[in-house]
Amino acid sequence: MADYNFLSIWKFDAPLEKVYNTIHDADNYHLWWKGQSKVETIKHGDAQGVGAVKKFKTRSFLPYSLTYTGTVLEVYPLKKVVGTTVGQLEGRGTWIFENDKGVAVVKYFWVVKTNSALMNFFTPILKPAFEWNHDIVMKWGEEGLAKYLGCNVIK
């Protein structure tokens, strides 16, 4: 398995609550996040979403897609959502939400391993391309969320 550590930071001129609610609603990622297929809910969580289990399929810029199942472990409304994934991507992701003088700041930390035999075979030579590809998919999310919410990305 290949190990990856990612940090993505998104900033929007939008209310933090709208940004948080949209990201926390993974069932609708396909509406705004290019490359995301419709999410399959395997198990509903509690009122805040803790315990929810969902199956994702993510297509990327490079010609492959990855399928994985995510479980929500922790939810601190408007502050943090933590989950794990198993499948072709195995790891732990943490969404952090902050308000900085009216700017909604979102940080996503993902420590992940690939379980795709093909990716792992090519990792010794293509790991930088896989990391670049991840950044593209996250950029699609950032741009798609801004368009969906009718706000701007702040650089």
Image (spheres, grey):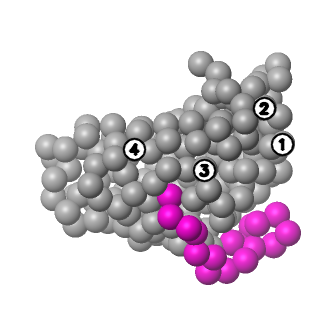
Q: Which residue is mark 3?
A: 32
Locate the C terminus by quadrant.
Answer: top right
Between disc 3 and disc 4, the foreground one is 3
Q: Which residue is mark 4?
A: 134
Front-most of residues 63 and 72? 63
| C-alpha gap between disc 3 and disc 4 | 17 Å
Between disc 1 and disc 2, the foreground one is 2
Q: Is residue 134 left or right of residue 84?
A: left
Q: Residue at x 14, y 43 (%)?
A: 125
| C-alpha gap between disc 2 and disc 4 | 25 Å
On the image, the x and y values in percent for residue 124 come to 16, 47
Could you tell which of marks 2 and 4 lies nearer the N-terminus? 2
Where disc 4 sits, the SS reads helix
Q: Which residue is mark 2?
A: 14
Label placed on residue 56: none
The span shown in magenta is 36-52
Where disc 1 sits, the SS reads helix
Q: How many C-alpha atoms fall within 10 Å of the one at disc 4: few (<14), some, or many (≥20)?
A: some
Could you tell which of marks 4 and 1 lies nearer the N-terminus? 1
Q: Which residue is mark 1?
A: 17
Could you tell which of marks 3 and 4 lies nearer the N-terminus? 3
Q: Is residue 31 magenta?
A: no
| C-alpha gap between disc 1 and disc 2 | 8 Å
